[in-house]
Image (spheres, rainbow, N blue to C red):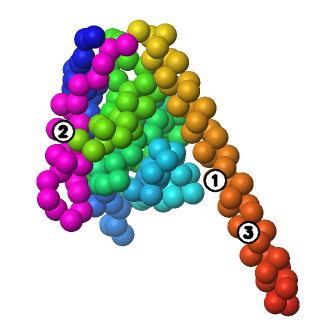
Amino acid sequence: MRKYKISEIADIQSGLVLSRKAANEKTSVYPYKRLTLRSVTEECLLDITSFEEYAASEPIDGQFLTKENDIIVRLFAPVCATLITKDYEGLVVPSQLAIIRLKDDSMYLPGYLSVYLTNQRILENLVEGAGMAAQKIIKVGNIAELEIPCLSMEKQKMISDIANEQLNIIALYKKIIEQESLRTKSVIKDIFGGKR
């Protein structure tokens, strides 16, 4: 089975160093929403509640803004990757995250590549390559050197669909748990005699 390095099939870079483009009282303000480290969860979901406001001093170059089918990877342990959908285009990607953007002629589906990057063995190899530091920082170059098996489009789609279904189930369970937690807190507060 043929394998290709990520650098052969995609453009990969770290996000924007936010302080370089931050607005101040002397500059114009260009408002954006931005991703944070918390935006890519350990379940490989995009946490939309973690987006933050970002005031830039000038328009942000498109290479630092999310686009549909981008794969966003946390560069700090725990390493996680998530796929960007059309609903979340135009978010500023900070330097703690990497952006993988498949080339137009790529023989890979973005969903498949995202799933492959979240494989436990691959993640362990990336973390091992990060060295002995207490805070493991993954190098973009290490991600670029990863070799991805080139499966048929049919198999890639099947893998992508199965993983997407699992992510939808995880998101649904998380939402149910959050709602149940709020309900429980409310009931306990009522028992103690407080207002809702």
Per the rendered image, the range of residues in magenta is 126-151
Based on the picture, tell me whether residue 27 belongs to the magenta stretch: no
Q: Are marks 1 and 3 in contact (CB under 8 Å)?
A: no
The residue where tag 2 is placed is 142
Residue 128 in the image: state x and y as whole percent: 19, 48
Residue for point 38% across, 17% down: 108
Q: Amino acid at mark 3?
A: Leu
Decide if residue 159 is in sight here: yes
Q: Residues within 10 Å of mark 3 (few under 14, many from 20)?
A: few
Q: Residues within 10 Å of mark 1 (few under 14, many from 20)?
A: few
Sequence-wise, which precedes: disc 1 or disc 3?
1
Based on the picture, tell me whether residue 127 belongs to the magenta stretch: yes
Residue for point 46% across, 14% down: 155
Residue situated furthest front in the rendering: 121
Q: Amino acid at mark 1?
A: Lys
Question: Which image quadrant: the N terminus?
Answer: top left
In the rendered structure, find residue 174 and report the number of the disc placed on it. Answer: 1
